[in-house]
Amino acid sequence: MKVINYLPLITKNSFRNRRRSLLTIGSLMVSLCLLVLLMAMYQVLFYGGEQTPAQAVRVLMRHKVSLGHPMPLAHEGKVRQVPGVKAVSVQQWFGGTYRDARDQRNFFARFGVRPADIFKIFPEYELPAEQKQAFERERTSCIASRILANKFGWKPGERITLVGDFLPITLELTLVGIYDEPYKDEVLYFNWDYMREGLAASGTRNELEESVSQFLVQTETPADVPRVIKAIDSMFDNSPFPTKTETEQEFIISFVSFLGNLKLFLLAIGGAVTFTILLVSANTLSMSVRERIREVGVLKTLGFTPGTILGVLLGEGMAVAVAGGALGCALAWGVCAMLRNAEIPIPQLRVMHVTPLIVSISLLIALLIGLLSALVPAIGAARRPILDSLRHTG
Amino acid sequence: MAIPITYNLRNLIVRKTTTVMTALGMALTVAVLIADLALVEGLRTAFQASGHPLQILVMRKGSNAELNSSVTREALQILKAKPGFAVNGAGEPMVSPEVLTVINLPSVDSPNGMNLTVRGVSQTGVGMREMKIQDGRWFQAGQREVVVGKSVAKRYPNAQPGKRLRFGRGEWEVVGVFDAGESAVNSEIWGELNQVGSDFNRQDTVSSVLVRANDAATVQALANSLADDRQLGVEAAREREYYEQQTSAGAPLQFFGLLVAVIMAIGSSFAAMNTMYAAVSRRAKEIGTLRVLGFSRGSILLSFLIESLLLSFIGGVFGCLLALPLNGVTTGIGSFATFSEIAFNFRVSPSAMLTGIVFALVVGAIGGLFPASNAARKEILTALREI
């Protein structure tokens, strides 16, 4: 007989005790949703999520120690000479304070850039042409990412004051544009030259005018990236300003290492969740098999072989677990969609995606869990002698 | 009249496989919650232990972290001349100018390198902290020598006594390991003020100045008098408050841990509900019998609720046992205030365990309520007739 013939029996059995099945599926759904989210998180944080074509040819170069350590502007000309480099521009990290520094909410990335270069190096940024021109024309203008502007309710024309810390100047900026981008980063760009003028006027720190915290490097093709990274870093390795050049994915990973040993935490929690699912599922199935001992006896007298009974029970376990898994994936997809524009302490989680790979892995896990948890009770039921089963009182 | 608790206990023992499985599932949930609390608690302890109650940290106006602060030597001279500082054993005022920078070293967790704070201090500065040399000796004046905190020695294979570190303008010899109790300075590397300062172009300025007031009554007055002095142009914060603020470095992890614990709790409450429904349906006859004996619907409800609470209590205790080995385990977290790593120990405190058990009981109550009311509503005759 074919497996397909037993499907109605399996489905019927699964819903024999509707409340229990629904609770089990609900419990598996929540746990598997968590497992899917953990995997999506792992992918975003340790593989940097999905790479866009623009990211594939872009690398960031900074001082080896941190963004807070400047590099001389003279590095720029040297990098431009490296074969495979198409364009180089600057990005100056401006720490400072917006409103009140004690409120974590006011913390977002602020960079000084050359307005004419920024959209060449970030072609995926979408900004209306007239806003683009305004940013290039007005020295005290700035632009913000959509998610940042929404967070503070900024509209074009908004006046934004940034008080510097390690750069001893205050920037009085006017928002002229809000751009859309796929990464959901909270970023504000202002005119680097405006900042340098301010530094020159304050006159205290000449070396800061001629230094920069990051270079944005664009390569000719994605294949050039590894070679360019190596060439740049080895060029400056023995200089007083050693560099660290990395892709945006690697940059995110190094940022993540700052949050603590997340990798280990994710793996530990993932393990705990999987084990919990196994326990829940095994518990339910053994309860449901125990209630049906007599019924199994009847099935045997009707001519069902122990093998068939084993198969039907295993099928039931898998059906329930896979249903939980599928719903869990759907739930996780909803959670990711909800986080897309949410205000959360780990901004990278906004770009989490439930990819087909993650879906297949979690369904496979669900299938295995269903199989494993049904195995012990099913073998027990298949082996039990008919008379013994029929005599059993629940 | 209430049904004795031994009835519930015996039932849990009879169905031991189911009991253990349900409780274990709940235990894992509780363990995740306790681990999260232990992490935040450990971080808080590390920062709280870092500040002396009488000490004030002086930084440039507008700076919220030592790393991006600078105080000129002139300002330092003016500051030193002020009255109100405590005096150390050598008769000098307790005023410690310090230089801070960050270097990058490979650690156990991140072989590609993690940032570490390097602090240049004077003899006075060392005397203002409660710390002792655990291994080797202190750095000597005029030498390119450093001592490393005990957490650094544990987590950075290159930062061991006898080894050399390359940073700034050359090599530095590691001559000792210091122990500063639970303080965050255990995650730092210390050298002599002038040596470190000259290596990082900091001859004319220092990063911050740590000062100590005479007694608790004058701390705030001293801080105010420093902050109000226009000539100085500085901010003066109590050292303890400065460090307490940095506990927020753990906020992302805390958020993440709580989220996971809550999601797992929803799953666990469903599982508990399942177990309790099974218990109710298996004992339908018993429930009928109990009713015949004169127990009211209320006491049946209470009895099943208690059973669910007992089950979740066992889960909570299991969870505590699972989380307990975490106590004292060292991990590191990056602080954006210092751009460097702070090592701290997980602290599984009694209050964290209590929270875990209460959490389990709440999950158990939610899971037990519906099955218990289901049991209480059963009609005597139908219940007795069920097989």
Image: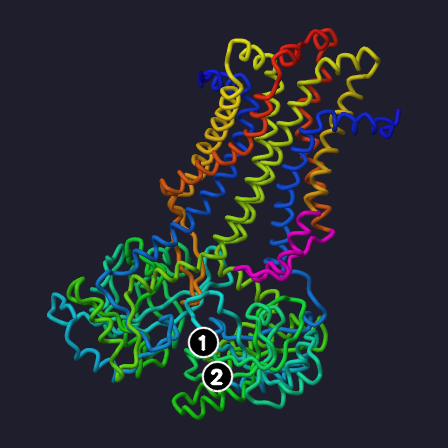
Quarter holding residue A10:
top right
* Residue located 63% across and 50% down the image: A37
Q: Position of residue B97 (x, y in %)?
A: 26, 74
Q: Dots 1 and 2: beta carbons under 8 Å?
A: yes
Q: Pointer 2: what residue?
A: A171
Helix, strand or loop under label 2: strand
Q: Which residue is mark 1?
A: A96
Q: Residue A341 magenta-drawn?
A: yes
The range drawn in magenta is A330-356
In the rendered structure, the answer to whether residue B136 lies left or right of residue A58 reads left
- Image location (x, y in percent) of residue B107: 45, 59
**Residue type, numbered disc 1:** Gly
Residue A281's quadrant in the figure? top right
Residue A94 at x, y percent in the picture: 49, 78
**Label 1: few (<14), some or many (≥20) within 10 Å?**
many
Q: CA distance from mark 1 to mark 2?
A: 10 Å
Label 1: which secondary element: loop
In the figure, A38 relative to A45: above or below? above
